[in-house]
Image: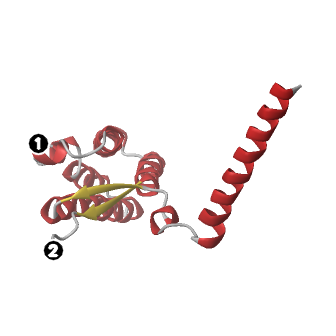
Amino acid sequence: MKKSTSWLSLLLSLSIVLNGVMFYRFIIAGAPVEMADQRTAIILEEGERELVLAEMRQFLIAVQGITQAIRKENMDNVVKEARAVGTTAAAAVPASLMGKLPLEFKQLGLKTHQNFDAIALDAESLGDGAHAMEQLGQLLDNCIACHSTYQIRPTPLKP
């Protein structure tokens, strides 16, 4: 009987302490800034950060160009826009930067480059704008997944 009472007292004490910590953490102290954005921060030197962001802007420019080319039924331009950001463009990323990027981020990036290659190949062989739009929608799923999961932050300035 005495042993079960001591366990009960221990559990009650632990519960009180945990509730107190949680009350302080979530009610008094509030959530830290990092909790406001659940994405994984990738910390890069400013030049590396600019390189990654420039590549993402190139993706967006290509998406716009592909969309306009499909609208104008110009499959040659679809091929041109998609090839410009295909896997050959990925070769320009320095190895030093690749070593800093999380594996999943690199996988999403490679898949995006490959999807652009597939759009170019299919546009060339099929000439079907509706098919290219479907592929573009699938490619944009990668963009959404990446931007929902990661943020690119610069290395903090040293005092």
Q: Residue at x 36, y 65 (%)?
A: 68
Left of 68 or right of it: where is 93? left
The image quadrant that residue 4 belongs to is top right
Tell me the quarter of the image containing the N terminus.
top right
Q: Residue at x 55, y 67 (%)?
A: 31
The image quadrant that residue 42 belongs to is bottom left
Would you place residue 69 above or below residue 145 in this image? below
Q: Which residue lies furthest to the right in this view?
A: 1
Q: Where is residue 134 in the image (x, y as percent from the top left)?
A: 48, 48
- Mark 1 is surrounded, within 10 Å at the Cα level, by few (under 14), some (14 to 19) or many (20 or more) other residues, namely few
- Using the image as rendered, state which of residue 116 and residue 158 is in the foreground: 158
Q: Which residue is drawn at 18% across and 43% down?
A: 98
Circle 1 is placed at which residue position? 95
Left of 11 or right of it: where is 148? left
Q: Earlier in the sequence, mark 2 or mark 1?
A: 1
User: Is residue 137 in sight in this rendering?
Assistant: yes
Q: Where is residue 49 in the image (x, y as percent from the top left)?
A: 21, 61
Tell me the quarter of the image containing the C terminus.
bottom left
The image quadrant that residue 19 belongs to is bottom right
Question: Which amino acid type corresponds to the residue marked 2 in the rendered image?
Answer: Pro
Q: Where is residue 128 in the image (x, y as percent from the top left)?
A: 42, 46
Q: Residue at x 11, y 45 (%)?
A: 96
Q: Where is residue 83 in the image (x, y as percent from the top left)?
A: 22, 48
- Using the image as rendered, state which of residue 110 and residue 70 is in the foreground: 110
Circle 2 is placed at which residue position? 159
Distance of mark 2 from mark 1, alpha carbons? 29 Å
Q: The residue tagged with tag 1: helix, strand or loop? A: helix
Would you place residue 98 above or below residue 31 in this image? above
